[in-house]
Amino acid sequence: MMRRESSPGERDSSVMTAAIASDEPRSHEASTRSRFKIARLSLRDWIRRAGVLLPLALIWIYLAVDVDVFLTTYNLNNLLLQGAVIGVLAFGTTFALLTEQIDLSIGAVAGTSAVGAAYVLVNYGWPWYMGVVAGVGVGFLFGVANGIFSTAFGIPSFITTLATLGIASGISYNLTGGESLYNFPEKFQDIGQGHIFGVRSPIVIALGVLVVLQFVLKRTRFGMSVYSVGDNASAAGLAGIRTMRIKAYAMIISGTCAGIAGVLLAAQLNTANPGFGAATLLPAIAAVVIGGTALTGGVGSVFGTALGVLVIVTLQNGLDLKGVNPFWKEPVIGAVILSVAVLDRRRR
Amino acid sequence: MTDDVTDVEQARNEAVTTLLQVEAVSKRYDATQALDCVDFDVRAGEIHALLGENGAGKSTLVRIMSGAVQPDEGVLRWSGDETSLNSPGVALKVGIAVVHQELALMPHLTVAENLYLNMIPTAGGRIGEAVGIVSRRRLYSRAAEFLRSIDFELDPRSLVGSLNQSQRQLVEIARALAQQARLILLDEPTSSLPPHERQDLANRLRSLRDHGIGIVLVTHLLGEAHELADRITVLRDGRRVGTVSSDEIDIQKLIELMTGRSEGSIFPEHDGRRSDERVPRLELRHLASYPSVKDVSFAVFAGEIVGLAGLVGAGRTGVLETIFGRRTRADGDILVDGRPVNYRSPLTAIEAGVAFIPEDRQTDGLFPEQSIRANVVIAAAQAKRGAKVTRLGRLVVSPRLARQVAAKLITALQIRTPSSELAARTLSGGNQQKVVLARWLAMEPSIVLADDPTRGVSIGSKIEIYQLLRDLARRGAAIVVVSSEFEELVGMCDRVIIVDQGANVAKLDLTRTTDFGADDLLHLVLSSTTVQAEAS
């Protein structure tokens, strides 16, 4: 990373903000409208969500008062766009945490997916949709590998995904020889830079993933099984749930979402670089934890994760707007994870 | 020996002193009045049992006496002086120690290390003390001497992890005594113990009493309380119903005090096998599975409740788990309605109409963080049979159907909760167990395997669970029950199979005999065990 001047909208060396730099001002209605209406929530969900909402509201009020440009549509659009990639990663890996697993490979897999998509587009000249298939497919396959090794072979997901993190990042460096791949078909770029219903497409795609996964979690038999396995795996087995399968599926969802995030990343930037994904692991896991998902499984929701994502990107955005040295971003997120974990422990 | 006797007598003479006196204590949690103006006292050299149903206020009272919770009103007196126990640490300094149901021991450390965890003797010399070098020699000699002084037969060098449950309990009690405790609060000390270990623990407690220690015994087992305690206090709905000397009351009276009802038997009537049944619903032929089941054969007819009696480790749970497909069958046959079956997983067993109520609801039954509704419908959602709660090829759970099914069962089983949306952990033990039962009732099972279905629940919930199982049998299910309480087996079952070392050694039909009591069954179990041990 290089030092940079940090006024809003200026080119940032970090991946996430660079994605936003070329952004145009757009409305953000879609996101605010969809925030409260997805599923029927229990009282405890409300309390849990309020736990995140309160600090989120405070940060927003502070930034709105303190920084003039914060509440501009331009900046809010930036903020949500930044949240899109982290969001898709975090939504998927919520399933891993809910089933008492963890997926450390999501960042690296997202990078490999971006490179994979770029590779077939640039080197083989495949059509844009095959780029999408390749990118998402890479994520899916890593998810399958993670699922198989951490269930059928009984290796803790922490170890499995640490290993696949290394493998994924090695593959993307080998494919590119460390160089960047760029110049994708326009249709592919539209995935990251175009608009759907007047909103930047990554935001819409991320919201789509959010809605689908929240539905899966709250309304389907699979979702019910996810909670049960994370809450009490032994009891789940005796109630007729195939616990290993559920855990494997959770890892596949996590990997596939990493694939989608990789495609979004490549399409937004019109380039793919093997070092891409590494920076997204920390904020994505942070968002899940801040969003109220218990590391011990069985408690949390994709919806909570979405609020966690908002906290993370607001912090990042606020630090940018305040002109803080970007090297402080990761330490700040780290500190937030620790404080949330401490608060969570004290509340129990 | 003579020294001991005089010691005991001395202690007895001093025993008139009241150690802890609780006066008019009240405690409120939100909407619940947990304790309402309760008096209680413990004397030195007495065992005072505290009885009551779940939610009667026993645990709140114990928490107040141990300093974990502060009363809203009322006074505590220690040896006559008013005292405030602000924390468990303060209570321990005063001389009050609690031994909880879940023990707080370090399994990888030795008995002696556990005893002196916070006061390990250091090696002599300046360096030894300054650096805190542990003197193992002193540690073990001190521990051995101490254990001898309180008549505990424990090897200070053995690892706590290698001890059985009752010995661990002794270690915890000894630790309290090593810290100069004069009053010990025991929370359900025997509920997880097999019968012979219970007896052992009971003897140790008596010996402690004779040394002048005051003991408060919180328990669900009425027989135990009656036999062991000098006085018994019964709580109901946060009020003290009475304190009686245990010589002056019988168990039937105790039940009446606890439940507030004065009906006769706590067990529903026996039915027995229907005369028209020819083929048993469930039949085992020489069933074997690793590691505990060697050779078990018996048959259960529809409408029958059959009990499996035996000591812990006899393989009773293994038999149930093998039928349910949780363990792999190594040998023998399982026949349902005369046809051999092979359930490879719990799911296939569930689909075939088998229900399994696990022994330990915390580890194998309950989903504590999930809603009561989800807890009830979870099995029904997985299987094709039973109550319908899913739509679209069973992909989607219908909230409406799930709510209906849960509501019906919550009413039928009288599960006491303000809402089915609440997390299952908010329920009391008995109600949690009823949630697990409700899950299986939703499946309309034809075979019910119940592993200690009333473990750790109050007498009121027990009566309801006995009735439920009998109702299931009357509706045509075949029921196999494992229990560690012989009274329960004799009271509830039509027939009892005695299992020892993985094989059935005796069968008895209780519908044909009257006057067969829990003691008779205990003798039978112990005698057939001996026979088996000699034979092998």
Image (spheres, coloured by chain):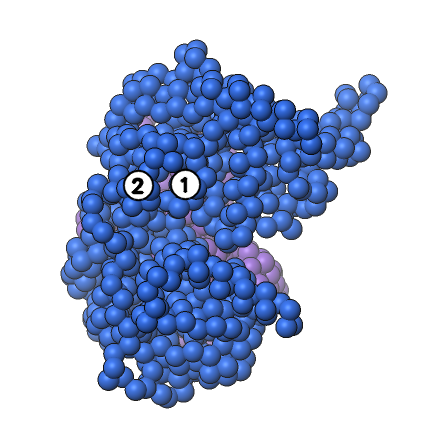
Chain colours: A purple, B blue
x and y, in percent, of residue B190 in the image: 47, 46
Q: Is B371 rendered above or below residue B122?
A: below
Query: What chain does badge 1 belong to?
Result: B
The vertical placement of B334 against B215, above or below, is below
Residue A178 image offset from top left, x and y in percent: 60, 60
Neighbours of disc 1 within 10 Å: few (<14), some (14-19), many (20+): many
Residue depicted at x 60% and y 61%:
A163
Q: Judge if badges 1 and 2 mark residues of a common chain.
A: yes
Mark drawn on residue B254: 2
The front one of B203 and A169 is: B203
Q: Secondary structure at mark 2?
A: helix
- For the residues bearing labels 1 and 2, Cβ distance under 8 angstroms: yes
Q: Secondary structure at mark 1?
A: helix
Which of the image's four quarters has the N terminus of chain B?
top right
Identified at 30% across, 34% down, the residue is B235
Q: Is residue A268 left or right of residue B45?
A: left
Question: Mark 1 or mark 2, which has the lower sequence index?
Answer: 1
Disc 1 residue type (three-letter):
Ala
Q: Which residue was labeled with disc 1?
A: B225
Disc 2 residue type (three-letter): Leu
